[in-house]
Image (spheres, coloured by chain):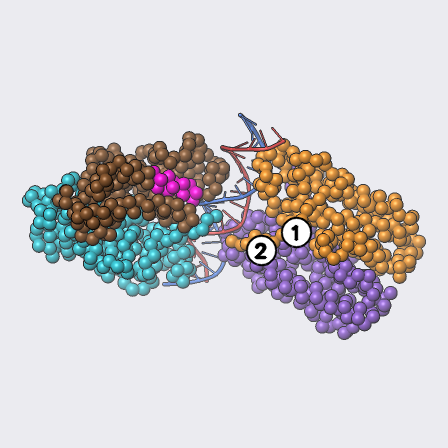
Chain colours: A cyan, B brown, C purple, D orange, E red, F blue
Amino acid sequence: MSTPPSSRLLATDARLPPTAAPPEGTRRRILETALQLFASRGYHDTSIRDLATALELRPSALYAHFAAKDHVLAELVRIGHEAHFEALETAFQAAKPTPADQVRALVHAHTRVHAEHPQLALVVNEEFYALSPALAAPAQALRDRANAMLIDAIRRGMAQGQFNPLHPEITAAAIVGMGSRIPHWFEPAGPIAVETLAATHAELALRMLGSVATA
Amino acid sequence: MSTPPSSRLLATDARLPPTAAPPEGTRRRILETALQLFASRGYHDTSIRDLATALELRPSALYAHFAAKDHVLAELVRIGHEAHFEALETAFQAAKPTPADQVRALVHAHTRVHAEHPQLALVVNEEFYALSPALAAPAQALRDRANAMLIDAIRRGMAQGQFNPLHPEITAAAIVGMGSRIPHWFEPAGPIAVETLAATHAELALRMLGSVATA
Amino acid sequence: MSTPPSSRLLATDARLPPTAAPPEGTRRRILETALQLFASRGYHDTSIRDLATALELRPSALYAHFAAKDHVLAELVRIGHEAHFEALETAFQAAKPTPADQVRALVHAHTRVHAEHPQLALVVNEEFYALSPALAAPAQALRDRANAMLIDAIRRGMAQGQFNPLHPEITAAAIVGMGSRIPHWFEPAGPIAVETLAATHAELALRMLGSVATA
Amino acid sequence: MSTPPSSRLLATDARLPPTAAPPEGTRRRILETALQLFASRGYHDTSIRDLATALELRPSALYAHFAAKDHVLAELVRIGHEAHFEALETAFQAAKPTPADQVRALVHAHTRVHAEHPQLALVVNEEFYALSPALAAPAQALRDRANAMLIDAIRRGMAQGQFNPLHPEITAAAIVGMGSRIPHWFEPAGPIAVETLAATHAELALRMLGSVATA
DNA sequence: TATGAATGAGCATTCATTCAT
DNA sequence: TATGAATGAATGCTCATTCAT
C-alpha cells in the first residue's frame, strides 16, 4: 500500500466561467466541487463518495441532479468548451480584420481562458477522453470550430504574404498547445500576470508564424 | 449507463526505449502491456485484471514481478525519464558549444523522444501525478535537471546577446510544452516525419527566443 | 487438503446481554451473527462473506453499518466488557461490606456472566488480541478496573486476618481464570445449573483464599 | 484500515520440549518458528509467507517438509500433548500412592509443563480447534487420558474420605483450568519462579478439593 | 532441498447506482 | 430534494499450494 498521490493542481478555488454557467443551487455546487476534485485527482480517481463528502451530502443525493457520474464531467466539458468558444468568437469579432491582429486576438483570448480557469482547462483537456463519444460530441464540435478559426487566419496571413511559417500544421499545433500547457505550470497567484501571459503568448505566436509585422 | 469512452491514443505498438529498459522476460512484457493500457485508458481506468487479461496471465501472477500496481507505473515513469534525460545529455554533448546550437540540439532530442515514444511520453506526462511523492521523486529529479539544461542555454544566449525572448520563463515553458503536446496530435505513421517535426520544433524554439541567427 | 475443523463452541443461540447492547435493527443482527461465528470459528477464520451469508445480506451491505471487519469485533468486545463490569459493580454494591462477602459476590457475578454468555466470553477473552491497541484500549481499561475490585477485596481480607492465601497473586489469577475457562467446558443446557456453578465458584474462591469463615 | 493487533504473547524464545521433539534440521526450525508465530498471532493470522519469511526461506520450500499448513499445527499439537502426558505419567508414578500426593504430583507437573512451555501450551489449548477432527484425534485421546488420571485420583480421595469437594466436576475443571490460564499471565522471566507456581497450584488444588490433610 | 513463477480461490473493501421513504 | 439501506460488480491484493527446474 502506498502513500496517496500528490495533487495535480492545487488552486484554491475552482470557479466556473460566468457565461454558459448553470444557475445557483445544488446543481451548481456539485459542478464546482466536481471541477475541483476532477482537476486535482482526475475523473477516474474521484468517486461519487468523494464528491458527496466534499459537498456534505450523501452519494444518493447527487442522482437527483445528474443522471450519472459521467454526466457531471460532460457538463463541465460542455461549459468549458462553450466559454472557450465564446471568448474566441468575441475576440475575433473585436479584432482589426488583418490576419496578424486576428491571430493576436485569438491567442490572447485562448490564453486568458486557460489562465483564468486552469481547473476547467485541465479537466477539459485531460479528462475529455473519459467521456463516451456521444457525450463528447458537442464539445468536439466546438473544439473543431475554434481550431478552424485560428487555422483560417493563418492561411489568410500566408496567402497575403504576412506569415511565413516553417510548417503550418506543426506551428498551429504548437500555438494551440501553449494554451493547453498553462494549467501545468502557470499559477494565477504567482508573479506573472494573466495579461502578461496572454500578451506574450500572442506575440510568441506571431514569431512562430514568422509574421513580417513583428520580425 | 454510458457507452465506454474512446481511447486516448491508439498507436499500434507500445515500445520501450532500448536504453534504461529492463531485460526480456515477464517483467518486461508486463511493462510493455501496461504502457499500452495506461496510455490509451489511463492508469486509474486500467485494472490489474485488465492488465493480466491482456497478458494472458492471472492477476496474482503479476505480484511475483511488481509489489503493487503503482510500482508498475513508477517503473514506466522512471524508464521514460531516464531515456529522456539520456537523449538530452547526449544531444547536448554532441552540439557545437553555442547557445543556439545547444537549444537546437536539446529541442530536437526532446521532440524525437516524444514523437518516437508517444505512449511513454503520455504516461510520463499525464499519469505522473498518480504516483505518491516517494515513487515520483527520482523522476522529478531528472525532470528538473533536464529543464535546467534548456534554461541554462537560454540564459547564456541572452547574456551573449544572441537571444531576445519577450519573457524567458514563459518562452521556456512554451518550448518545453511543444514536446508534451506531441502524443495528443502527432501520428508516427502519419504524413509528417519525426525528423521534420524535430527540426521544425528546433527552429520554432529559436524563433520564439528571438534568435538573431534566425530572425 | 484437509477436512474443515470442528467448531470451538456449538451453543445454539448467541445472545447479547440486555444492558450495553445496541438497539434492534440490522446493526444488532450483524453483532449477534458475528458473535456466533467468531465464537465458533474465531475472528480470523470468519470472513465478511461468511458473515453476510449467515445474515442473508450482500457483503457490501455490512459496510453501511460498520466501517471495517475489526470494528464489529471491537463492538462485541466493548459490549462484553461493559456487561461484565456492570455485573461486577452491581454485585459488589449489593454485598455486605466484608471481604468474604464481597469476594463471594464478585466471583458469583463473574461466573454468571461467563456462563450465561459463553460466546461473548469466548470472543472477549480469546479474540481480544486480534484488535489493534487503539480499538482494544477501552475494553482493557474496564478489565483492569474489574481485576482491581477483586484484588482490593483480597487485600482487605488479608489485612483483616480473614484470608490466608498461599500466594495472593497466583491465587487471584486462578480465581479469575475459573471464569475464563467456563466457555470451554460448561454447557448452559447441560446438567449443571448456572446458579450451582456460580455458587460453587464463589465458595471455591474462598477456599483458595484460605478464608477462615469457610475453612 | 486499522493498526496491526498487538501480540498475544511476547516470550523471547519458543522452545520445544526435549522429549517427543523432532530431530535437528529444517523440519525442527519450521516447528520452532511456527510455534513462535502461532502463539503470538494465532494460526489463522499466520500465513505460510509469514512463516517462510521468518525462516528466511521461500514459501514453496516448506512443502518439502510438511504436506500442508495444518500439518505443522498438528505436529505442534501432538508434541505438546505427548510432552504433557509423559510429564503427568512420570509424576504420577513417582508419587506416593495416596490420592493427595497423586493430585499434588499431577497438578505440579501439569503446571510446570504450562509454565515452562507457554507458547506450546497456548497453541495446544487455543489453536487446537483449527485442526480437522482427523488431525486432532491423537491429541484428544491423550488429553482424555490425562484428565482421567486426575479425576480418578479425586474419586479415590473422595472414596477414602480424604477429599470433600463442593462439586467434583466443577472442581476438576477449575483445577485443570489453572494450567490453561498460565500462558495468559505468567511470565517465566518474571518475579514468580516456576517451582513456586507449581507448588502453589498443587496446594490450591488440595484446598479446592477440601483435602483433610491440608484443611 | 530449495527456488521462481504461476495458479485459482478467496480476501476486505469500494464502486456507481437504485429505491422506498 | 435528500436520505439510509441495499445491491451486484469490481477493486487491489493475499492465500495455500503446485510444479518444472
Is residue A27 depicted above or below B152 in this figure?
Answer: below
Asked whether, in this view, residue C63 is left or right of residue A85, the answer is right
* Dominant SS in magenta: helix
Count neighbours of disc 2 (C-alpha within 10 A) and say few if under 14, some if 14 to 19, many if 20 or more. some
Q: Residue furthest left?
A: A160
Residue at x 40% of width, y 58% of height = A52
Residue drawn where x is 9% and y is 47% of the image: A212
Determine the secondary structure under disc 2: loop
Horizontally, is F8 left or right of B39 in the view? right
Q: Chain of mark 1?
A: D
Residue D90 percent coordinates (x, y): 84, 43
Residue annotated with mark 1 = D10
Say which of B101 and D43 sits in front: B101
Q: Position of residue D119 (x, y in %)?
A: 70, 48
Q: Is residue A78 visible?
A: no
Question: What number is the disc on residue C42?
Answer: none
As helix, strand or loop, the secondary structure at mark 1 comes to loop
Query: Hey, what amino acid is under mark 2?
Result: Ser
The answer to whether one can see residue D44 in this image is yes
Residue D94 is covered by the magenta coloring:
no
Q: From mark 1 to mark 2, how far is it between C-alphas? A: 16 Å
Please state the extent of the stretch shown in magenta in the rendering: B70-84
Q: In the picture, residue A25 is in which quadrant?
A: bottom left
Where, by quadrant of the figure, is residue F1 drawn?
bottom left
